[in-house]
Image (cartoon, rainbow, N blue to C red):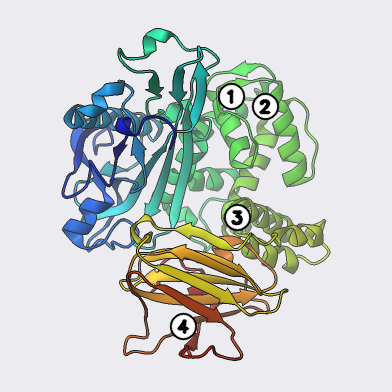
Amino acid sequence: MLGHPSLRVTIRGLLAAALIVRATTGLAAEPGAARRGVVWTDVALRLAYGADSSTLRPSSPRPNAALLVLGEDSEYRPASGPVSQNPNAALDELASELAAVTEDLASRLDGQPITITDDPNQAGLFVILDARYPSAGQYGGYLNAYNCILTITVIDSSTKETVAAATLASEYGDAIDVSQFAEGTTTIWKKLPLPSESSQIEGFAGVLAKYLHIPEIASTESAPAVLGIEGALLYLQNESFNNLYAYLRDGKTLTRGASGENAKAFQAMLIDLGAGIKADGQAGSQTITAYQSVFRDALGETVGDSLDQRAFESLVFAMVAGRDAALARSLYPDAPTELIDTLRAERLFSNQQYYSAYSLFMSLGSYGDSADRAAMCVQPWPSAGALERAGAYRGTLAELKILSTYPSDTACLVKIYARDGGFAASLFVPGGETTTIGIAPGEYMVRVGSGQAWFGAEEAFGQDGAKYSTLEFNGEDKLMRIEQEYTHTLTLLANDLPNGAAPVGADPLTWEAFAAKESE
């Protein structure tokens, strides 16, 4: 990390042991009410419950109760500079900033049934906060400034599914007032960004709202009671969309240059459908260009430079189809099934669920450009090495070397889990190559997938022609044991075992089980 190490407050250091940062939050059961909440760390969770946010499964989770957790590798650098030399002052500042973030987030989720809980066993959601500090540059030749990037990830505590995520940035401009630098320091750090300052927050809030609300209309087991636009809006559960629809239903249009909440809702719809614009409430030329592009790409139609009721309803249809194809077919029985499936496949692709998108595009046969889109789902191989690492299992006291003797046209994805099922690491190993990682001593379960077509870290090699298995090492529990001060070598598909090497068995595994983030 660039800058002065003495100015760093580490989550695993200062916030270790049983320390829990207390902050005032606005995400309360009653609108506008403030309450005392806690922000947990993974260290504190492990001490109290023997598991961190990636492995803890609450005993009695409430669906809409959220637990705030500071990511274990997160950092905090007090904007007040040398105050970091006083840990208590640094924690007070951190608590204050976290309170501002959660209160601002609460205002963006106004009306949603979400509460902050202090009890991890009641948490239906884990809200993971992770801060980073990239350099903003040097000013005046000697003043160093750092921006702050805050990632908010919402995880279902039971399934470990990522519900919603947003990356927020708090950045310095081209010039900085020297008065912003505390006396005695030549380095300053941006404060944690507020959700309302990010263009992502509307889409983030919409996704989270959709997950929190599971209205009757969302069930596809029987036909929904309300069809078309009314049923779709009930499913989306977004008040700003409802207000915009009421405005357009009176025969009005939203034209280039419009501003205000309706313009912001319009922009949020475009962002949801993949437009890279900001929801700033100013529907200028960039918004209209994005509108025309989204309409053409998603629906194969052209539109002018204004939004009317018909175009709004088409955008809502595209949003619902992307989320739930079966529901869209129920809500819109006259809509082409191929179009609905295409919209669903496009959203899967944008979510980096490349194999799922590939399968759906392939099922569409010659419809549109489905074949070309299916081909785009196959991703280039990454270089040999770790794709993901969990901080708790990083280490320098032992090494794991993985050697692949697969042919050069076949690669392997190796997933490593702790004894309790917690995810430790995933490594990509092309045929004939080797990769080595530092790892904490312990006992691990190892899963291996192999194939030729690569669909990304989440969905690996898909199901077609790929193989997946759990390795069974010698020993009653069939786990791989990593001992301190040793380099352990795991050879994949070795025809001739090296002298002294022990063979490892393999238990076949389904693609669905392999693709799951957590082991069972």
Q: Residues within 10 Å of mark 4 (few under 14, many from 20)?
A: some
Q: Residues within 10 Å of mark 2 (few under 14, many from 20)?
A: many
Look at label 1 and name its amino acid. Ala
| Residues under numbered marks 3 and 2 in contact, where contact means CB atoms less than 8 Å apart | no
Q: Quadrant of residue 464?
A: bottom right
Q: CA distance from mark 2 to mark 4?
A: 52 Å
Q: Position of residue 301 (x, y in %)?
A: 79, 41
Tally the marks.
4
Tag 2 residue: 287
Mark closest to the chain's N terminus, 2 or 1? 1
Look at label 4 and name its amino acid. Leu
Q: Position of residue 96 (x, y in %)?
A: 25, 27
| Residue 517 vs residue 285, the one in the foreground | 517
Mark closest to the chain's N terminus, 4 or 3? 3
**Mark 2 or mark 1: which is in front?**
2
Look at label 3 and name its amino acid. Gln
Look at label 2 and name its amino acid. Thr
| Residues under numbered marks 4 and 1 in contact, where contact means CB atoms less than 8 Å apart | no
Q: Residue at x 52, y 23 (%)?
A: 137
Residue 263's disc is: 1
Q: Position of residue 189 (x, y in %)?
A: 39, 25
Q: Is residue 65 left or right of residue 457?
A: left
Q: Quadrant of residue 445?
A: bottom left
Question: What kind of element bears circle 2?
Answer: helix
Tag 4 residue: 471
Q: Is residue 426 above or below residue 324?
A: below
Residue 237 in view, yes or no: no
